[in-house]
Amino acid sequence: MGVIRSFTGGMGFFLQGLRWVARNPGWWLFGLVPALIVFVLYAVGLYFLGTGAGDLAEWLTPFADGWSAGLRDTFRILVGVVVFGAGLVLAAVTFAAVTLVVGEPFYEKLSEQVERTYGEVPTGHEVPLWRSIPRSIKDSLVTLGYVLLFTVPLFFLGFVPVIGQTVVPVLGAMVSGFFLTVELTALAMERRGLVRRSRFALLRGDKALALGFGVLLFLLFLVPLGAVVAMPAAVAGAAIMVRTRLAPGGPPAGNPPAGPFPPGPRPQAR
């Protein structure tokens, strides 16, 4: 029950972020700008991948040239679908990382504003923009390496009958969801001076929480325009989750999380 409670609690933090941007629509629009730019770039890339999936499948399966026409064409259609599906999953996994790099000034301000409505914003670990962007790119590439370490074997397992259509999609969603949480919590954790290794350790310490937050987002990111609409809420929810559950020393004094959907502290009056 504890795992389930933590998993639903992770989902609840996204809902808290969604409520926050609903109460602050100006910040939601502010956070849409970089997400929309990256979405257009990804949409163009996926369009070309989709239109060229047949040729790519043919290039990947030269060994099928001698098969009967029906079997060869069916197999290559399946390979094309898997290739496009892998591209779609990779786009969903990397969308947050690329959007956070492109829109770092936007999301840093958004994340700070979320924390400001919950109390004092942690200070003392600020990094100039000219240093933070290269560091974010480096961290995102390291995270992408971890993602590929898991998703490449899952890609090939996807060709295995039954397992490829049942177990693999579930494992893929879990892996993708965890690393989405890694990317989205980075801003709030860096604000507390936490380096990449420490951030990973905190999230591994409560995998169910990280998965609940990230898997829900992963599924939303697969929906057309879902990533664009959800991105500001995801950043807000990640900031709340770090502040109330993952920050060193636990939640701020007097504001313990409660229930499977921790409400967090009340925003301060302005």
Image (spheres, rainbow, N blue to C red):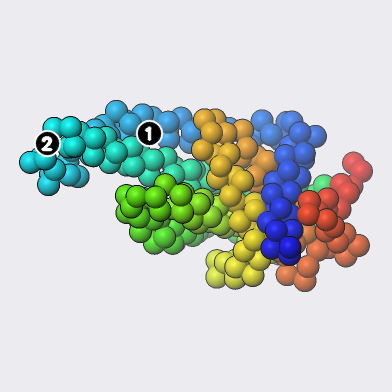
Measured from the top left, where is residue 251 in percent x and y? Answer: 81, 63
Task: Determine whether 121 is above or below 165 in the image.
Answer: below
Q: Categorize mark 2 by other alpha carbons within 10 Å: few (<14), some (14-19), many (20+).
A: few
Looking at the image, residue 77 lies above or below residue 155: above
Give the position of the C terminus as an image quadrant.
top right
Q: Work out whether mark 2 precedes mark 1 in sequence or the reverse, and give the earlier one.
A: 1
Whether residue 73 is visible: yes
Within-10-Å neighbours for mark 1: few <14, some 14–19, many 20+ = some
Residue on which disc 2 sits: 68
Please report the residue visible at 48 percent of the width from the left and 43 percent of the height from the top.
92
Residue 97 appears left or right of 260 = left
- Classify mark 1: helix, strand or loop: helix
Residue at (34% x, 50% y) in the render: 161
Vertical order, 54 against 12 (above or below): above
Seen from the viewer's position, the closer of residues 113 and 95 is: 95
Q: Quadrant of residue 83?
A: top left
x then y, percent, for residue 3: 69, 63
In the image, what residue occupies the spot 69% across and 49% down?
11
Circles 2, 1 touching at the beta carbon (< 8 Å): no
Query: In the rendered structure, which amino acid carries the disc numbered 2?
Result: Ser
What x and y, as percent, mark residue 163? Answer: 40, 53
Q: Amino acid at mark 1?
A: Leu
Residue at left 39%, top 62%? 149
Against 190, residue 220 (above or below) is above
Q: Which mark is residue 204?
A: none
User: Which residue is the site of mark 1?
Assistant: 46
Residue 113 visible, this angle? no
